[in-house]
Image: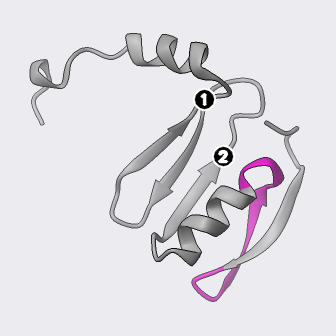
């Protein structure tokens, strides 16, 4: 996680984008691998980060395993959600 404003410019789909420095390698790997990203934020020590994919899926980024389990526990089972 990095401080707000600690970004680098990356060219994504031919356009310059400000990407949080700490997740830039993940964003680069996804895009280089053909998985287009359209938005992202590392969370800046305030909340879990996220990466929004072109196909509308969203990846949640947690700083560690313990935090990821706590975030996961806040969601009800998908079987109980009308999707």
| Residue 41 tag number | 2
Residue drawn at x 61%, y 66% is 29
The x and y percentages for residue 7 are 85, 57
The quadrant holding residue 24 is: bottom right
Q: Could you classify mark 2 by the number of other residues whose Cα lies within 10 Å: few (under 14), some (14-19), or many (20 or more)? A: many
Q: Is residue 73 left or right of residue 83?
A: right
In the current view of this chain or complex, which residue is farthest to the bottom?
14
Residue drawn at x 77%, y 33% is 44
Q: Is residue 74 left or right of residue 43?
A: left
The answer to whether mark 1 and mark 2 are in CB contact below 8 A is: no
The range drawn in magenta is 12-23
> Please, is residue 55 above or below residue 11 in the view?
above
> Is residue 49 located in the magenta-colored stretch of the structure?
no
Quick one: quadrant of the N terminus?
top right
| Distance from Cα at disc 1 to Cα at disc 2 | 11 Å
- Front-most of residues 66 and 57: 66
Colour mapping used in the image:
one colour
Residue drawn at x 66%, y 68% is 28
Q: Is residue 30 left or right of residue 43?
A: left
> Please, is residue 58 above or below residue 24 in the view?
above
């Amino acid at each position: 996680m990095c401080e707000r404003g600690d970004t680098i410019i990356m060219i994504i789909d031919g356009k310059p984008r400000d990407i949080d420095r700490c997740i830039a390698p993940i964003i680069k790997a996804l895009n280089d691998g053909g998985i287009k990203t359209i938005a992202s934020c590392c969370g800046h020590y305030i909340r879990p980060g996220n990466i929004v994919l072109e196909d509308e899926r969203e990846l949640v980024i947690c700083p560690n395993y313990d935090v990821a389990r706590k975030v996961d526990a806040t969601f009800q089972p998908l079987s109980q959600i009308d999707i």
